[in-house]
Amino acid sequence: MSTNEELFARAQRVIPGGVNSPVRAFRAVGGVPRFVQRAQGAYFWDAEDKRYIDYIGSWGPMILGHGHPAVLSAVQEAAVQGFSFGAPTEREIELAEAILAHLPSMDMVRLVSSGTEAAMSAIRLARGATGRKKIIKFEGCYHGHADALLVKAGSGLATFGNPTSAGVPPEVVQDTLVLEYNDLAGLEQAFAEHGAALACLMIEPIAGNMNFVRASVPFIRRCRELCTQHGALFVFDEVMTGFRVALGGAQSVYAREIPGFVPDITVLGKVIGGGMPLAAFGGRRAVMEQLAPLGPVYQAGTLSGNPVATACGLATLHEIGKPGFYEALARRTQALVAGLRQAAADEGVPFSGDSEGGMFGFFLLDALPQNYRTVMTTDGARFNQLFHGLLERGVYIAPALYEAGFVSAAHSDEDIAQTVDAARAVFRLLARG
Ligand SMILES: *Cc1c(COP(=O)(O)O)cnc(C)c1O
Protein backbone atom coordinates (compact mmCIF):
# COMPACT_ATOMS: atom_id res chain seq x y z
CA MET A 1 0.00 0.00 0.00
CA SER A 2 1.27 3.49 -0.87
CA THR A 3 1.29 6.07 1.87
CA ASN A 4 0.08 9.64 1.53
CA GLU A 5 3.67 10.75 1.96
CA GLU A 6 4.97 8.53 -0.86
CA LEU A 7 2.21 9.66 -3.19
CA PHE A 8 2.85 13.31 -2.37
CA ALA A 9 6.57 12.93 -3.14
CA ARG A 10 5.77 11.17 -6.42
CA ALA A 11 3.10 13.74 -7.34
CA GLN A 12 5.44 16.65 -6.74
CA ARG A 13 7.85 15.31 -9.35
CA VAL A 14 5.27 15.46 -12.14
CA ILE A 15 2.56 17.92 -11.07
CA PRO A 16 3.38 21.46 -9.83
CA GLY A 17 3.06 21.31 -6.04
CA GLY A 18 1.75 17.76 -6.41
CA VAL A 19 -1.83 18.95 -6.95
CA ASN A 20 -4.14 20.15 -9.70
CA SER A 21 -5.71 22.92 -7.62
CA PRO A 22 -3.54 24.79 -5.10
CA VAL A 23 -5.64 24.50 -1.91
CA ARG A 24 -5.32 20.69 -2.00
CA ALA A 25 -1.59 20.94 -1.28
CA PHE A 26 -2.13 21.82 2.43
CA ARG A 27 0.22 24.80 2.06
CA ALA A 28 -1.89 26.91 4.42
CA VAL A 29 -2.05 24.29 7.18
CA GLY A 30 1.20 22.42 6.58
CA GLY A 31 1.62 18.66 6.50
CA VAL A 32 0.93 16.02 3.90
CA PRO A 33 -2.27 16.08 1.80
CA ARG A 34 -4.47 13.00 2.07
CA PHE A 35 -4.70 11.18 -1.26
CA VAL A 36 -8.24 9.92 -1.62
CA GLN A 37 -8.69 6.30 -2.55
CA ARG A 38 -12.49 6.04 -2.52
CA ALA A 39 -15.54 7.62 -0.95
CA GLN A 40 -18.99 6.52 0.12
CA GLY A 41 -21.79 8.53 1.72
CA ALA A 42 -20.34 11.02 4.20
CA TYR A 43 -16.86 9.47 4.22
CA PHE A 44 -13.71 9.12 2.21
CA TRP A 45 -10.69 6.90 2.75
CA ASP A 46 -7.14 8.02 2.15
CA ALA A 47 -4.23 6.07 0.68
CA GLU A 48 -3.58 4.48 4.08
CA ASP A 49 -7.21 3.36 4.35
CA LYS A 50 -7.95 5.85 7.12
CA ARG A 51 -11.57 7.02 7.12
CA TYR A 52 -12.57 10.68 7.36
CA ILE A 53 -15.95 12.33 7.84
CA ASP A 54 -15.93 14.59 4.80
CA TYR A 55 -16.96 18.24 5.27
CA ILE A 56 -15.70 19.54 1.94
CA GLY A 57 -17.68 17.25 -0.37
CA SER A 58 -15.55 18.22 -3.37
CA TRP A 59 -15.98 21.87 -2.22
CA GLY A 60 -19.74 21.68 -2.38
CA PRO A 61 -21.00 19.46 -5.20
CA MET A 62 -21.54 16.26 -3.17
CA ILE A 63 -24.75 17.42 -1.51
CA LEU A 64 -26.16 13.87 -1.56
CA GLY A 65 -22.96 12.37 -0.23
CA HIS A 66 -20.65 10.18 -2.28
CA GLY A 67 -21.92 7.39 -4.50
CA HIS A 68 -25.65 8.07 -4.17
CA PRO A 69 -27.26 5.03 -5.88
CA ALA A 70 -29.68 6.98 -8.12
CA VAL A 71 -26.93 9.31 -9.32
CA LEU A 72 -24.49 6.47 -9.84
CA SER A 73 -26.90 4.50 -12.01
CA ALA A 74 -27.80 7.62 -14.06
CA VAL A 75 -24.10 8.18 -14.74
CA GLN A 76 -23.52 4.53 -15.62
CA GLU A 77 -26.43 4.51 -18.07
CA ALA A 78 -25.32 7.74 -19.70
CA ALA A 79 -21.74 6.53 -20.05
CA VAL A 80 -22.92 3.45 -21.94
CA GLN A 81 -24.80 5.71 -24.38
CA GLY A 82 -21.68 7.76 -25.11
CA PHE A 83 -19.18 10.06 -23.42
CA SER A 84 -19.42 13.12 -25.63
CA PHE A 85 -20.88 13.99 -29.01
CA GLY A 86 -20.25 17.64 -29.82
CA ALA A 87 -23.89 17.76 -30.91
CA PRO A 88 -26.97 18.63 -28.86
CA THR A 89 -28.81 16.14 -26.66
CA GLU A 90 -32.25 16.03 -25.07
CA ARG A 91 -30.69 15.76 -21.62
CA GLU A 92 -29.24 19.28 -21.94
CA ILE A 93 -32.78 20.59 -22.40
CA GLU A 94 -33.97 18.59 -19.40
CA LEU A 95 -31.19 19.97 -17.21
CA ALA A 96 -31.82 23.53 -18.41
CA GLU A 97 -35.54 23.10 -17.65
CA ALA A 98 -34.78 21.64 -14.22
CA ILE A 99 -32.49 24.57 -13.33
CA LEU A 100 -34.92 27.21 -14.60
CA ALA A 101 -37.81 25.62 -12.71
CA HIS A 102 -36.15 26.58 -9.43
CA LEU A 103 -34.71 29.98 -10.38
CA PRO A 104 -37.43 32.41 -11.50
CA SER A 105 -34.79 35.10 -12.23
CA MET A 106 -33.65 33.07 -15.24
CA ASP A 107 -35.48 32.56 -18.55
CA MET A 108 -32.55 30.89 -20.29
CA VAL A 109 -29.32 29.20 -19.29
CA ARG A 110 -26.11 28.18 -21.02
CA LEU A 111 -24.20 25.14 -19.79
CA VAL A 112 -20.42 25.17 -19.49
CA SER A 113 -17.82 23.00 -17.76
CA SER A 114 -16.47 24.99 -14.78
CA GLY A 115 -17.41 27.83 -12.48
CA THR A 116 -14.43 29.79 -13.75
CA GLU A 117 -15.72 29.52 -17.29
CA ALA A 118 -19.26 30.45 -16.24
CA ALA A 119 -18.18 33.55 -14.29
CA MET A 120 -15.83 34.68 -17.04
CA SER A 121 -18.58 34.25 -19.63
CA ALA A 122 -21.11 36.10 -17.45
CA ILE A 123 -18.76 39.10 -17.32
CA ARG A 124 -18.32 39.04 -21.11
CA LEU A 125 -22.09 38.80 -21.51
CA ALA A 126 -22.66 41.74 -19.14
CA ARG A 127 -20.13 43.83 -21.01
CA GLY A 128 -21.55 42.83 -24.39
CA ALA A 129 -25.15 43.43 -23.35
CA THR A 130 -24.49 46.86 -21.83
CA GLY A 131 -21.72 48.04 -24.14
CA ARG A 132 -19.79 49.06 -21.01
CA LYS A 133 -16.40 48.04 -19.65
CA LYS A 134 -16.13 48.45 -15.89
CA ILE A 135 -17.07 45.79 -13.36
CA ILE A 136 -17.33 45.72 -9.58
CA LYS A 137 -16.20 42.82 -7.44
CA PHE A 138 -15.67 42.53 -3.69
CA GLU A 139 -12.55 41.78 -1.69
CA GLY A 140 -12.67 38.17 -0.46
CA CYS A 141 -15.14 36.97 -3.11
CA TYR A 142 -13.79 34.37 -5.53
CA HIS A 143 -15.24 34.01 -9.00
CA GLY A 144 -12.78 31.58 -10.52
CA HIS A 145 -9.43 32.37 -12.08
CA ALA A 146 -10.27 34.40 -15.18
CA ASP A 147 -7.74 37.23 -15.61
CA ALA A 148 -10.10 40.15 -15.00
CA LEU A 149 -11.27 38.60 -11.72
CA LEU A 150 -7.88 37.90 -10.14
CA VAL A 151 -7.76 41.27 -8.43
CA LYS A 152 -7.30 42.61 -4.95
CA ALA A 153 -8.07 46.08 -3.69
CA GLY A 154 -5.49 48.73 -4.36
CA SER A 155 -4.66 51.31 -1.71
CA GLY A 156 -7.41 53.70 -0.68
CA LEU A 157 -11.15 53.47 -1.09
CA ALA A 158 -12.79 52.58 -4.40
CA THR A 159 -9.61 52.23 -6.34
CA PHE A 160 -9.16 49.90 -9.26
CA GLY A 161 -7.45 46.77 -8.18
CA ASN A 162 -4.07 45.12 -8.58
CA PRO A 163 -3.60 41.65 -10.08
CA THR A 164 -3.32 38.87 -7.47
CA SER A 165 -1.47 36.61 -9.87
CA ALA A 166 1.66 36.89 -11.93
CA GLY A 167 0.80 36.72 -15.61
CA VAL A 168 -2.17 39.07 -15.33
CA PRO A 169 -1.20 42.38 -16.96
CA PRO A 170 -2.40 45.50 -15.07
CA GLU A 171 -4.33 46.65 -18.14
CA VAL A 172 -6.50 43.50 -17.94
CA VAL A 173 -7.73 44.45 -14.47
CA GLN A 174 -7.84 48.20 -14.95
CA ASP A 175 -11.61 48.07 -15.39
CA THR A 176 -12.18 45.92 -12.31
CA LEU A 177 -13.19 47.94 -9.28
CA VAL A 178 -12.63 46.12 -5.97
CA LEU A 179 -14.80 47.14 -3.02
CA GLU A 180 -15.11 46.04 0.59
CA TYR A 181 -17.89 43.51 1.21
CA ASN A 182 -20.90 44.90 3.12
CA ASP A 183 -19.55 48.47 2.92
CA LEU A 184 -22.49 50.68 1.91
CA ALA A 185 -20.47 53.92 1.79
CA GLY A 186 -17.90 52.41 -0.61
CA LEU A 187 -20.70 51.07 -2.78
CA GLU A 188 -22.43 54.46 -2.99
CA GLN A 189 -19.18 56.19 -3.86
CA ALA A 190 -18.29 53.66 -6.57
CA PHE A 191 -21.65 54.12 -8.31
CA ALA A 192 -21.47 57.91 -7.91
CA GLU A 193 -18.09 57.95 -9.63
CA HIS A 194 -18.39 55.14 -12.18
CA GLY A 195 -22.12 54.31 -12.48
CA ALA A 196 -22.47 55.21 -16.16
CA ALA A 197 -19.47 53.05 -17.11
CA LEU A 198 -20.44 49.95 -15.10
CA ALA A 199 -21.36 46.80 -17.00
CA CYS A 200 -22.03 44.79 -13.88
CA LEU A 201 -21.57 44.19 -10.19
CA MET A 202 -20.64 40.60 -9.32
CA ILE A 203 -21.02 39.24 -5.82
CA GLU A 204 -20.98 36.00 -3.86
CA PRO A 205 -24.22 36.69 -1.94
CA ILE A 206 -23.19 34.37 0.86
CA ALA A 207 -19.44 34.39 0.46
CA GLY A 208 -17.92 30.93 0.82
CA ASN A 209 -14.42 31.79 -0.28
CA MET A 210 -13.64 33.84 2.82
CA ASN A 211 -15.02 31.11 5.08
CA PHE A 212 -18.70 32.09 5.49
CA VAL A 213 -19.75 35.73 5.35
CA ARG A 214 -23.25 36.86 4.45
CA ALA A 215 -23.93 40.01 2.50
CA SER A 216 -26.36 41.93 4.69
CA VAL A 217 -29.93 42.36 3.46
CA PRO A 218 -29.59 46.19 3.27
CA PHE A 219 -26.37 45.74 1.29
CA ILE A 220 -27.96 43.42 -1.30
CA ARG A 221 -31.02 45.69 -1.49
CA ARG A 222 -28.81 48.71 -2.19
CA CYS A 223 -26.72 46.81 -4.77
CA ARG A 224 -29.98 45.96 -6.56
CA GLU A 225 -31.25 49.56 -6.46
CA LEU A 226 -27.98 51.07 -7.65
CA CYS A 227 -27.57 48.57 -10.50
CA THR A 228 -31.12 49.28 -11.68
CA GLN A 229 -30.68 53.06 -11.40
CA HIS A 230 -27.40 53.06 -13.30
CA GLY A 231 -28.22 50.40 -15.89
CA ALA A 232 -25.59 47.93 -14.66
CA LEU A 233 -26.35 44.22 -14.43
CA PHE A 234 -26.43 42.59 -10.99
CA VAL A 235 -24.60 39.24 -11.21
CA PHE A 236 -25.08 36.69 -8.44
CA ASP A 237 -22.22 34.21 -8.36
CA GLU A 238 -24.06 31.21 -6.95
CA VAL A 239 -21.48 28.64 -8.02
CA MET A 240 -21.23 27.67 -4.37
CA THR A 241 -24.61 28.73 -2.96
CA GLY A 242 -26.82 27.58 -5.86
CA PHE A 243 -28.84 24.49 -4.84
CA ARG A 244 -26.65 24.39 -1.71
CA VAL A 245 -28.17 26.94 0.67
CA ALA A 246 -31.71 26.37 -0.65
CA LEU A 247 -33.42 24.87 -3.70
CA GLY A 248 -33.79 28.42 -5.04
CA GLY A 249 -30.23 29.40 -4.13
CA ALA A 250 -29.14 32.44 -2.13
CA GLN A 251 -31.41 34.61 -4.27
CA SER A 252 -34.42 32.86 -2.75
CA VAL A 253 -33.01 33.51 0.73
CA TYR A 254 -32.76 37.27 -0.01
CA ALA A 255 -36.15 37.30 -1.75
CA ARG A 256 -37.69 36.31 1.61
CA GLU A 257 -36.49 39.67 2.99
CA ILE A 258 -36.63 41.77 -0.18
CA PRO A 259 -39.97 41.08 -1.91
CA GLY A 260 -39.56 40.48 -5.64
CA PHE A 261 -35.77 40.40 -5.44
CA VAL A 262 -33.98 38.94 -8.47
CA PRO A 263 -30.45 39.30 -9.83
CA ASP A 264 -29.97 39.92 -13.57
CA ILE A 265 -27.49 37.11 -14.22
CA THR A 266 -26.85 34.01 -12.10
CA VAL A 267 -23.69 31.94 -12.23
CA LEU A 268 -23.96 28.28 -11.17
CA GLY A 269 -21.60 25.34 -10.77
CA LYS A 270 -20.68 22.76 -8.12
CA VAL A 271 -24.04 21.17 -7.05
CA ILE A 272 -25.61 21.37 -10.54
CA GLY A 273 -22.97 18.91 -11.75
CA GLY A 274 -23.28 16.60 -8.74
CA GLY A 275 -19.50 16.08 -8.82
CA MET A 276 -19.01 16.12 -12.62
CA PRO A 277 -17.51 19.08 -14.51
CA LEU A 278 -20.60 21.18 -15.15
CA ALA A 279 -21.49 24.82 -14.58
CA ALA A 280 -23.88 27.36 -16.07
CA PHE A 281 -24.89 30.98 -16.33
CA GLY A 282 -28.29 32.39 -17.08
CA GLY A 283 -30.63 35.32 -16.89
CA ARG A 284 -33.47 37.09 -18.60
CA ARG A 285 -34.20 36.24 -22.22
CA ALA A 286 -33.19 39.63 -23.64
CA VAL A 287 -29.77 39.40 -21.99
CA MET A 288 -29.16 35.73 -22.83
CA GLU A 289 -30.11 36.29 -26.48
CA GLN A 290 -26.98 38.41 -26.78
CA LEU A 291 -25.03 35.14 -26.80
CA ALA A 292 -23.78 33.45 -29.97
CA PRO A 293 -25.27 32.07 -32.16
CA LEU A 294 -28.16 34.55 -31.61
CA GLY A 295 -26.14 37.59 -30.66
CA PRO A 296 -22.70 39.15 -30.83
CA VAL A 297 -21.24 37.81 -27.55
CA TYR A 298 -19.10 34.76 -28.35
CA GLN A 299 -18.97 31.78 -26.04
CA ALA A 300 -18.46 28.07 -26.77
CA GLY A 301 -17.17 24.74 -25.43
CA THR A 302 -16.28 21.32 -26.85
CA LEU A 303 -17.47 19.53 -23.71
CA SER A 304 -20.24 21.97 -22.75
CA GLY A 305 -23.43 20.13 -21.76
CA ASN A 306 -21.49 16.87 -21.64
CA PRO A 307 -23.92 13.91 -21.65
CA VAL A 308 -22.42 12.13 -18.64
CA ALA A 309 -22.14 15.35 -16.62
CA THR A 310 -25.71 16.37 -17.43
CA ALA A 311 -26.96 12.93 -16.37
CA CYS A 312 -25.15 13.34 -13.05
CA GLY A 313 -26.51 16.86 -12.57
CA LEU A 314 -30.07 15.90 -13.48
CA ALA A 315 -30.14 12.93 -11.13
CA THR A 316 -28.74 15.13 -8.35
CA LEU A 317 -31.33 17.87 -8.93
CA HIS A 318 -34.05 15.24 -8.95
CA GLU A 319 -33.03 13.94 -5.51
CA ILE A 320 -32.60 17.36 -3.90
CA GLY A 321 -35.94 18.50 -5.28
CA LYS A 322 -37.79 15.98 -3.10
CA PRO A 323 -39.99 17.49 -0.36
CA GLY A 324 -38.23 18.13 2.94
CA PHE A 325 -34.70 17.68 1.56
CA TYR A 326 -33.40 21.13 2.50
CA GLU A 327 -35.22 21.23 5.83
CA ALA A 328 -33.44 18.03 6.88
CA LEU A 329 -30.10 19.21 5.51
CA ALA A 330 -30.38 22.60 7.22
CA ARG A 331 -31.37 20.99 10.52
CA ARG A 332 -28.32 18.74 10.46
CA THR A 333 -26.00 21.57 9.49
CA GLN A 334 -27.42 23.78 12.26
CA ALA A 335 -26.93 20.93 14.73
CA LEU A 336 -23.27 20.72 13.73
CA VAL A 337 -22.65 24.45 14.18
CA ALA A 338 -24.61 24.52 17.46
CA GLY A 339 -22.63 21.52 18.73
CA LEU A 340 -19.31 23.13 17.83
CA ARG A 341 -20.41 26.41 19.46
CA GLN A 342 -21.36 24.62 22.68
CA ALA A 343 -18.12 22.61 22.75
CA ALA A 344 -16.03 25.78 22.22
CA ALA A 345 -17.98 27.60 24.94
CA ASP A 346 -17.49 24.70 27.37
CA GLU A 347 -13.74 24.75 26.74
CA GLY A 348 -13.45 28.55 26.79
CA VAL A 349 -12.44 28.95 23.13
CA PRO A 350 -13.73 32.01 21.22
CA PHE A 351 -16.11 30.81 18.50
CA SER A 352 -18.64 32.18 16.08
CA GLY A 353 -20.42 30.18 13.41
CA ASP A 354 -23.22 30.41 10.88
CA SER A 355 -24.95 28.24 8.30
CA GLU A 356 -27.55 28.33 5.57
CA GLY A 357 -28.96 25.12 4.14
CA GLY A 358 -26.05 22.70 3.80
CA MET A 359 -23.26 25.30 3.90
CA PHE A 360 -21.57 26.46 7.09
CA GLY A 361 -18.59 28.33 8.42
CA PHE A 362 -17.01 29.10 11.74
CA PHE A 363 -14.30 31.35 13.11
CA LEU A 364 -12.18 31.24 16.25
CA LEU A 365 -13.42 34.78 16.88
CA ASP A 366 -16.10 36.12 19.23
CA ALA A 367 -18.21 37.64 16.47
CA LEU A 368 -18.88 36.78 12.83
CA PRO A 369 -16.78 38.89 10.44
CA GLN A 370 -18.59 41.12 7.94
CA ASN A 371 -15.75 41.46 5.45
CA TYR A 372 -12.43 40.03 4.33
CA ARG A 373 -10.37 42.42 6.44
CA THR A 374 -11.94 41.03 9.62
CA VAL A 375 -11.71 37.44 8.40
CA MET A 376 -7.97 38.06 8.09
CA THR A 377 -7.73 38.84 11.82
CA THR A 378 -8.29 35.13 12.59
CA ASP A 379 -5.29 33.46 14.20
CA GLY A 380 -4.00 31.14 11.47
CA ALA A 381 -1.82 29.09 13.81
CA ARG A 382 -4.78 28.22 16.05
CA PHE A 383 -6.89 27.29 13.06
CA ASN A 384 -4.10 25.01 11.82
CA GLN A 385 -3.95 23.30 15.21
CA LEU A 386 -7.69 22.76 15.01
CA PHE A 387 -7.45 21.46 11.45
CA HIS A 388 -4.75 18.91 12.24
CA GLY A 389 -6.41 17.90 15.51
CA LEU A 390 -9.62 17.13 13.63
CA LEU A 391 -7.78 15.39 10.79
CA GLU A 392 -6.01 13.11 13.25
CA ARG A 393 -9.42 12.26 14.74
CA GLY A 394 -10.88 11.39 11.33
CA VAL A 395 -12.69 14.66 10.56
CA TYR A 396 -11.77 16.40 7.31
CA ILE A 397 -12.58 20.12 7.11
CA ALA A 398 -11.19 22.52 4.51
CA PRO A 399 -7.39 22.81 4.78
CA ALA A 400 -7.53 26.62 4.94
CA LEU A 401 -9.47 28.92 7.21
CA TYR A 402 -10.81 30.96 4.28
CA GLU A 403 -13.12 28.20 3.12
CA ALA A 404 -16.70 27.28 3.94
CA GLY A 405 -17.75 23.78 4.98
CA PHE A 406 -20.42 21.49 3.56
CA VAL A 407 -22.76 18.94 5.07
CA SER A 408 -24.44 16.33 2.86
CA ALA A 409 -27.65 14.38 3.15
CA ALA A 410 -25.50 11.35 3.96
CA HIS A 411 -24.15 12.85 7.21
CA SER A 412 -25.95 11.15 10.09
CA ASP A 413 -26.66 12.49 13.56
CA GLU A 414 -23.97 10.05 14.70
CA ASP A 415 -21.43 11.64 12.30
CA ILE A 416 -22.30 15.08 13.66
CA ALA A 417 -21.97 13.86 17.24
CA GLN A 418 -18.58 12.26 16.50
CA THR A 419 -17.42 15.48 14.87
CA VAL A 420 -18.47 17.56 17.85
CA ASP A 421 -16.68 15.14 20.22
CA ALA A 422 -13.50 15.39 18.16
CA ALA A 423 -13.74 19.19 18.11
CA ARG A 424 -14.30 19.29 21.87
CA ALA A 425 -11.07 17.36 22.43
CA VAL A 426 -9.15 19.74 20.15
CA PHE A 427 -10.74 22.86 21.69
CA ARG A 428 -9.53 21.57 25.08
CA LEU A 429 -5.97 21.43 23.73
CA LEU A 430 -6.35 24.90 22.19
CA ALA A 431 -7.57 26.35 25.48
CA ARG A 432 -4.43 25.11 27.19
CA GLY A 433 -2.48 27.12 24.58
C1 LIG B 1 -15.80 27.33 -6.91
C2 LIG B 1 -16.21 28.70 -7.28
C3 LIG B 1 -15.95 29.26 -8.54
C4 LIG B 1 -15.06 28.56 -9.53
O1 LIG B 1 -15.57 27.37 -9.98
P1 LIG B 1 -14.58 26.27 -10.62
O2 LIG B 1 -15.50 25.19 -11.07
O3 LIG B 1 -13.63 25.88 -9.54
O4 LIG B 1 -13.88 26.94 -11.75
C5 LIG B 1 -16.49 30.48 -8.85
N1 LIG B 1 -17.24 31.16 -7.96
C6 LIG B 1 -17.51 30.67 -6.74
C7 LIG B 1 -18.36 31.46 -5.82
C8 LIG B 1 -16.99 29.45 -6.36
O5 LIG B 1 -17.23 28.99 -5.12
Image (tube, rainbow, N blue to C red):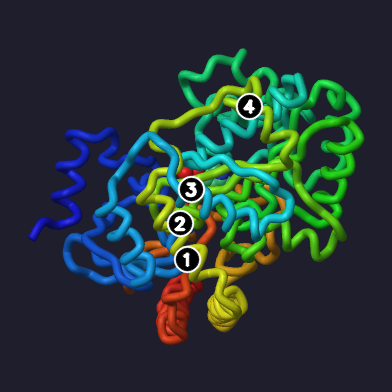
Q: Which residue is mark 4?
A: 294
Distance between the alpha carbons at the discs numbered 3 and 1: 21 Å
Report whether residue 223 is seen: yes
Distance between the alpha carbons at the discs numbered 1 and 4: 35 Å
Q: Which residue is mark 2?
A: 313
Mark earlier in primary sequence (1, 4): 1
Q: Amino acid at mark 4?
A: Leu
Local SS, label 4: loop
Local SS, label 1: loop
Label 2, ligand 1: CB separation under 8 Å:
no
Q: Nearer the viewer, residue 339 or 39?
A: 39
Q: Amino acid at mark 1?
A: Ile
Mark earlier in primary sequence (3, 1): 1
Q: Which residue is mark 1?
A: 63
Q: Amino acid at mark 3?
A: Glu
Q: Which residue is mark 3?
A: 92
Residue located 61% across and 69% down the image: 357
